[in-house]
Image (cartoon, rainbow, N blue to C red):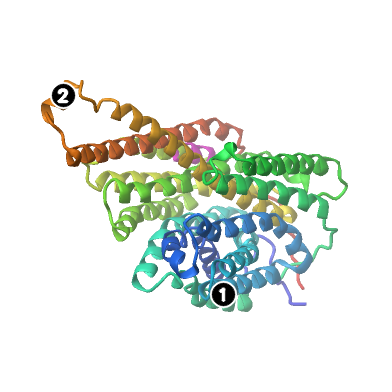
């Protein structure tokens, strides 16, 4: 057994900087894959012999597999060790990334993406656990700022990087790019990642199965709903039944079982529970706005993919600046104040987005993106810090996996919600606007006394553009009110006393 493999809080941890660099490389690699493949889907369609409907399973299989596997992180890390699980996850994720890059048809691609999601599910929660383990409580804010920068900036730069790789090389490099990054991360983790003590506890297969049923059902509703017209299809009702029955049985089982799958003691910590609600809201706002902006900028403003990436890049810069500053402020400023100000900044950015018009330049897009990045960064860092500062260190692996799961579910719900509202509002707005295009409108007949087919087609294009922009603006309004509705939750957070959580005992293997 190596001496002082994991030092107690307050004592120096050897190679802390190299540990942080290695695990963050792996984390960014995994987070990027949630969005980097989106822009490559049209290119995959022809090469893999897929249709527009079936190729989306490349995304769905990864999301569902990752969501189902994430809650198992706590039990697996106790059983085989956090270090060992992290290393296995990195190797499996990189191997499946290479396999995805070499896929020969849709079936092989979906299979490899499913395995990639299963292998990579533990990387994000374990990276957060390691950063909390190797840093003393007074440095939790800085550690969570660094971790949050990777988590939140990754999805922002994913589409830009994916578009560049697809355009400059081909879609296979979207996956193959993980190979050098994964090798560097694995080498650093093998050399410096500390070991942890094993905790042998029984695996609750029934609880895991019920939770997986609920998560899988919910993800399938969100991913397949739009394609089958939601609840007009029996398929969606079947997924809803799986979700509702699985969730009900899981909650009842967790309350009554002697050794449940998730330790219910986590939910006795008020900061952690409030943090789960907050991170759900952050998940909705972050990826929902990211899902709206690229198609809006391309479809209405006519920006090419590279320009879309450049216009959205300042959002990531704002997020990183905010996190680095707030990581230090969180030690001296009440985190509840920081969270509240961050939510107000985020709401202000969404209000700015409601002023988008086809005649504007890119300045408002950039400014609103920077403000939103500053706001979300200011929420994420103190929230991640305060949510884990009072929780029992023995529960951290389970707690971080649940934290990541709730954030991902929030993102999936947010994307589905804004997509549904966008489609319906587009149809309603188009109907309202096109009602004025008739021979009895004097303004129209004054402009076009005898309109021909070309003029009517141009008018229809303008109506489509305006109706779509109205739908986007309504989505931004909705996200703004969702953000403001989370403000009262800041009052439920309690600032931890000096010293933070009780230190974990030093362990060695």
Identity of the residue drawn at 57% across and 76% down: 188
Write down the quadrant of residue 311 in the picture: bottom left
* Number of residues whose C-alpha sits closer than 10 Å to that of mark 2, classed few (under 14), some (14–19) or many (20 or more): few
Would you say the residues marked 2 and 1 are in contact, meaning their CB atoms lie under 8 Å apart? no
Confirm whether residue 262 shows in the render: no
Disc 2 element: helix
Q: Looking at the picture, does residue 405 appear above or below residue 177?
A: above
Q: Residue furthest right?
A: 258
Residue 163: x and y, percent?
38, 63
Q: Which residues, given as a range, are shown in magenta?
A: 335-342
Q: Is residue 180 left or right of residue 162?
A: right
* Number of residues whose C-alpha sits closer than 10 Å to that of mark 1, classed few (under 14), some (14–19) or many (20 or more): many
Task: Verify whether residue 337 appears in magenta.
Answer: yes
Pick whichever, 351 or 118, lies toward us: 118
Q: Quadrant of the N terminus?
A: bottom right
**Mark 1 = which residue?**
99
Decide whether the magenta segment is chiefly helix, strand or loop: helix
**Mark 2 = which residue?**
443
From the viewer's perspective, is the residue at label 2 or at label 1 nearer?
Answer: 2
Identity of the residue drawn at 58% across and 60% down: 62
Residue 456: x and y, percent?
21, 37
Task: Verify whether residue 448 appears in magenta.
Answer: no
């Amino acid at each position: 057994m190596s001496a002082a493999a994991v030092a107690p809080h307050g004592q120096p941890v050897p190679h802390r900087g190299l540990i942080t660099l290695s695990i963050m490389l792996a984390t960014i690699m995994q987070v990027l894959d949630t969005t980097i493949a989106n822009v490559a889907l049209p290119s995959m369609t022809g090469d893999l012999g897929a249709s527009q409907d079936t190729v989306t399973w490349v995304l769905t299989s990864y999301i569902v597999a990752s969501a189902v596997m994430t809650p198992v992180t706590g039990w697996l890390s106790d059983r085989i060790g956090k270090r060992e699980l992290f290393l296995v996850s990195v190797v499996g994720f990189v191997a499946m990334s290479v396999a995805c890059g070499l896929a020969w048809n849709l079936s092989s691609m979906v299979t490899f993406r499913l395995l990639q999601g299963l292998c990579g599910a533990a990387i994000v929660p374990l990276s957060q656990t390691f950063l909390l383990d190797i840093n003393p409580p007074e440095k939790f804010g800085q550690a969570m700022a660094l971790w949050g920068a990777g988590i939140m900036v990754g999805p922002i730069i994913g589409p830009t990087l994916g578009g560049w790789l697809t355009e400059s090389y081909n879609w296979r490099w979207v996956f193959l790019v993980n190979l050098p990054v994964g090798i560097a991360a694995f080498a650093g983790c093998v050399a410096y990642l500390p070991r942890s003590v094993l905790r042998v506890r029984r695996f609750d297969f029934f609880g895991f199965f019920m939770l997986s049923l609920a998560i899988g059902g919910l993800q399938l509703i969100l991913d397949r709903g739009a394609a089958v017209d939601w609840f007009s299809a029996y398929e969606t009702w079947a997924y809803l039944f799986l979700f509702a029955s699985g969730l009900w049985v899981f909650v009842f089982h967790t309350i009554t079982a002697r050794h449940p799958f998730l330790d219910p003691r986590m939910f006795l910590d008020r900061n952690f529970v409030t943090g789960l609600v907050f991170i759900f809201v952050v998940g909705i706002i972050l990826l929902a706005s990211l899902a709206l902006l690229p198609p809006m900028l391309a479809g209405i403003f006519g920006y090419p993919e590279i320009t879309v990436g450049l216009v959205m890049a300042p959002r990531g810069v704002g997020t990183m600046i905010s996190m680095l500053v707030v990581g230090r402020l969180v030690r001296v400023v009440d985190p509840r104040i920081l969270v509240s100000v961050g939510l107000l900044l985020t709401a202000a950015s969404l209000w700015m987005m409601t002023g988008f018009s086809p005649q504007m330049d890119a300045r408002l897009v950039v400014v609103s993106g920077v403000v939103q990045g500053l706001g979300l960064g200011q929420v994420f860092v103190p929230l991640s810090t305060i949510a884990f500062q009072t929780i029992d260190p023995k529960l951290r692996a389970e707690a971080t996996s649940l934290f990541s799961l709730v954030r991902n579910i929030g993102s999936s719900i947010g994307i589905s919600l804004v997509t549904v509202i966008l489609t319906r509002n587009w149809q309603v707005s188009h109907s309202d606007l096109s009602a004025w295009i008739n021979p009895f409108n004097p303004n129209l007949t004054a402009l076009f006394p005898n309109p021909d087919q070309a003029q009517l087609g141009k008018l229809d294009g303008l109506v489509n553009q305006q109706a779509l922009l109205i739908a986007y603006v309504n989505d931004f309004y909705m996200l703004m009110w969702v953000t403001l509705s989370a403000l009262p939750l800041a009052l439920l957070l309690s600032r931890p006393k000096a010293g933070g959580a009780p230190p974990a005992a030093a362990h060695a293997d």
